[in-house]
Image (cartoon, grey):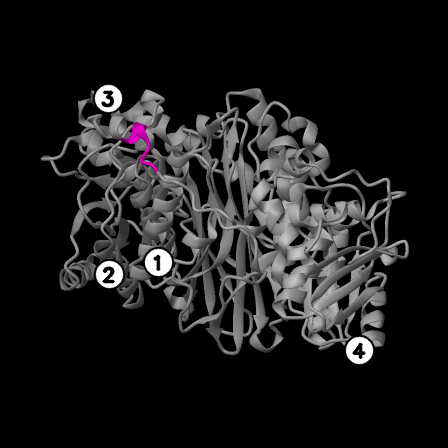
């Protein structure tokens, strides 16, 4: 038993336990693990490690249902990031995380530290970060506070990424009243490495040194993990101390130093001090290796005076790393860190006893079985109940909505709608060309990056439609995966794996947990059908503001591989006279569409349908057509339906070519133009390739029809739409 901690520590009461987010059952479990009452520092350690943010107590049972293995998967869930084999001895490392609550109360630092954290997850695996993607969800931009959040988040992302020198190559942004006061700031990072450099966060050798390097520890970010595990309220603005402060210049130094350490083979395990800080990095590395770890907090560099052991263990100060280094390599470790102007601080050693032992001021302030902190964390079997609102929304008949009297302003207003409008005003703030790998830049279906020294390219997309998941969580979950894969396929790539960030409200509410469980089921089914296993990700619960939950918003990050650069396909029209072909089923209703949301200011169903077999076949036709050289452009249909997709294909044409479209007269024109039926791709091809493309679709039993021709400098649809490309551009580039 450790010595008692100083008398200045508060007495452990049930009120204090509750203030730490722990239940009476949790506390009794802690006492069983320890065989005694915990110290104050130990209570803090358990509180952050058993928070929803760290231990996934409400979600881990369902997450185990995901498909996580495959021929290309080198490392699935459970490590800092997933690792996928792309051939030629190379691997892609990728993951997505959230920084929602911090960004709600301190938008700039919340977003910036989100970028810093996900970068560390990638380079601790041994990979150099080569790209970032930013799926963002904001409240109504007409509200001043939401605009403040938008500006702060985008500036934070841009400043950190630009300083570190990692390009932001893709992302998406939705605006909705649902996200008022609780933005979703998800950040995805992708890295590249030689397979032989893969490094895990694991302590395996007794006697190895525990080495700290990076920024000194301060009081910023204390209880950041528990802050992320509670709803936002009127008091949340007072929790700014739970938000960390980023330092991108130190981030760049620790990035380079870490990669040097790994390539020099002088570390056996490494982890960043992210959520739960020093606590998480020590106990998890020891637990994964079935080892113990002993550290002395007096050796921790500190930038604040009189920090207590509780504060030192729970601080989430940014840009800090913990490495496990063999004793005989410590001089090389010190030399490499000195090269990057970093101090080599030896905190302690790896032990055989399986305990995480923490000393401070000559006292043992914590002594906990390392593996138990994670392995014995709580599991909550939440109640799920179908929300009442689903019955109400599905009874609405969107066909009863009157068609627009004039389709020209209707299309222009939709192109200017904040969710659909061009995000050029955002991505122009990011450096997307640094490292000179970006082949297809932001603003297209997906980003494409070259892999230097090979013919390979990778395609990256992130997608998630919270409105669909609100209307039908199961179908919405499937659509999220399918759209991300479809975007990647349209570039000429083979989708091979996903990461995810699952953003939901309070899981203790049965209707919210129903949304989560059904989205998980839909994502899993889609991943199995499309052969895109899950490599890892993040769950973010308690995304509520004043008791109102955000839309259930799973976001999927999709990785695809292009083996031949000739397959890289643009999304904009290419040549005058080309045929325009629509691949996939007919649209049947307006439910769940941005068109209805824009017109009615409410969310109404039904959700667009999703048939996974159809989706798989449509993607196969697109992929095979591209590889056969039949296709000049490909663009998936999503928000805004066919009319928006055609307008975007015109605007993304280098020569801004127009199009003449003839719609099926048997369909109601507003449904045909603005309905958001899934599994549809807009393609263009030379007239000489049309028959071959149609035959390929027939072989796969996929509906394909020529709907128009690339022509002129106007978009003309039947006799209802006649707009210049300049007017489309002016509307689409509206800044909210």
Name, please, the residue furthest toward the left: 666
Viewer-nearest of discs 1 and 3: 1
**Which residue corresponds to mark 1?**
527
Range covered by the magenta-colored residues = 385-390
**Which residue corresponds to mark 2?**
621
Quarter of the image with the N terminus is: bottom right
User: Picture quarter containing residue 346?
Assistant: bottom right
Q: Residue 32 location in percent, x, y?
A: 63, 54
Residue 275 horizontal side relative to residue 598, left or right: right
**Which residue corresponds to mark 4?**
329
In the foreground, 640 or 364: 364
**Which badge, 4 or 1, is on the more N-terminal residue?**
4
Q: Is residue 722 magenta?
A: no
Q: Is residue 627 above or below residue 518?
A: below
Residue 404 tag number? 3
Residue 283 horizontal side relative to residue 349, left or right: left
**Which badge, 1 or 3, is on the more N-terminal residue?**
3
Q: Distance of mark 2 from mark 4, alpha carbons?
A: 54 Å
**Which badge, 4 or 3, is on the more N-terminal residue?**
4
**Which badge, 2 or 1, is on the more N-terminal residue?**
1
């Amino acid at each position: 038993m450790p010595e008692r901690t100083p008398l200045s520590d508060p007495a452990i009461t049930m009120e204090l336990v509750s203030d730490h987010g722990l239940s009476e059952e949790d506390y009794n479990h802690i006492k069983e693990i320890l065989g005694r009452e915990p110290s104050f520092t130990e209570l803090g350690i358990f509180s952050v490690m058993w928070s929803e943010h760290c231990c996934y107590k409400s979600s881990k049972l369902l997450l185990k249902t995901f498909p996580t293995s495959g021929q290309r998967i080198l490392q699935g869930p459970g490590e800092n990031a997933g690792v996928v084999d792309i051939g030629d001895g190379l691997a892609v490392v990728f993951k997505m995380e959230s920084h929602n609550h911090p960004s709600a109360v301190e938008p700039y630092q919340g977003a910036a530290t989100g970028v810093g954290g996900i970068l560390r997850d990638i380079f601790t695996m041994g990979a150099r970060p080569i790209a970032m993607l930013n799926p963002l969800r904001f409240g109504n931009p007409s509200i001043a506070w939401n605009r403040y959040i938008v500006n702060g988040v985008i500036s934070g992302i841009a400043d950190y990424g630009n300083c570190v020198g990692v390009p932001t190559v893709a992302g998406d942004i939705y605006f909705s009243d649902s996200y008022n006061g609780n933005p979703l700031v998800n950040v995805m990072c992708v890295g590249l490495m030689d397979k032989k450099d893969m490094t895990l966060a694991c302590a395996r050798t007794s006697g190895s040194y525990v080495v700290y390097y990076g920024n000194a520890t301060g009081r910023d970010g204390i209880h950041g993990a528990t802050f992320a595990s509670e709803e936002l309220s009127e008091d949340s603005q007072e929790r700014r101390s739970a938000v960390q402060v980023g330092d991108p210049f130190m981030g760049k130094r620790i990035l380079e130093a870490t990669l040097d350490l790994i390539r020099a083979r002088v570390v056996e395990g490494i982890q960043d001090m992210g959520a739960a800080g020093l606590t998480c990095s020590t106990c998890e590395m020891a637990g994964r290796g079935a080892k113990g770890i002993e550290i002395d907090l007096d050796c921790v560099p500190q930038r604040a005076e009189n920090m207590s052991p509780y504060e030192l263990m729970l601080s989430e100060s940014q840009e800090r790393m913990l490495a496990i280094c063999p004793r005989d390599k410590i001089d090389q470790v010190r030399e490499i860190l000195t090269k990057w102007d970093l101090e080599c601080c030896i905190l302690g050693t790896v032990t055989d006893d399986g305990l995480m032992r923490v000393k401070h001021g000559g006292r043992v302030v914590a002594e906990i079985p390392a593996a138990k902190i994670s392995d014995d964390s709580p599991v909550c079997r939440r109640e799920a109940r179908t929300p009442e609102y689903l019955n109400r929304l599905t009874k609405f008949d969107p066909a009863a909505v009157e068609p627009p009297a004039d389709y020209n302003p209707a299309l222009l207003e939709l192109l200017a709608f904040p969710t659909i409008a061009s995000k050029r005003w955002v991505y122009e703030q990011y450096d997307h060309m640094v490292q000179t790998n970006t082949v297809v830049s932001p603003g297209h279906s997906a980003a494409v990056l070259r892999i230097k020294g090979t013919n390979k390219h990778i395609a990256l997309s992130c997608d998630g439609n919270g409105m669909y998941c609100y209307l039908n969580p199961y179908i919405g979950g499937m659509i999220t995966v399918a759209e991300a894969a479809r975007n990647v396929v349209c570039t000429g790539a083979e989708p091979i794996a996903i990461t995810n960030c699952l953003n939901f409200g309070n899981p203790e509410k049965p209707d919210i947990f129903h949304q989560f469980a059904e989205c998980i089921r839909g994502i899993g089914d889609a991943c199995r059908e499309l052969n895109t296993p899950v490599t890892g990700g993040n769950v973010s619960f308690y995304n509520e503001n004043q008791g109102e939950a955000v839309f259930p918003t799973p976001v999927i990050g999709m990785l695809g591989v292009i083996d031949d650069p000739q397959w890289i396909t643009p999304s904009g029209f290419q040549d005058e006279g080309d045929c325009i072909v629509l691949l996939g089923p007919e649209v049947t209703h307006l439910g769940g569409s941005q068109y209805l949301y824009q017109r009615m200011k409410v969310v109404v169903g039904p959700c667009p349908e999703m048939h996974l077999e159809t989706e798989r076949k449509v993607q196969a036709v697109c992929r095979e057509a591209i590889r056969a050289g039949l296709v000049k452009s490909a663009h998936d249909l999503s928000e805004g339906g066919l009319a928006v997709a055609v307008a975007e294909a015109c605007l993304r044409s280098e020569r801004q070519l127009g199009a003449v479209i003839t719609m099926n007269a048997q369909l109601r024109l507003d449904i045909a133009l603005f309905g958001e039926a899934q599994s549809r791709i807009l393609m263009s091809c030379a007239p000489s390739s049309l028959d071959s493309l149609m035959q390929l679709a027939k072989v796969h039993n996929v509906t394909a029809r020529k709907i128009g021709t690339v022509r002129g400098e106007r978009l003309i649809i039947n006799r209802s739409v006649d707009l210049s490309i300049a007017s489309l551009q002016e509307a689409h580039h509206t800044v909210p």
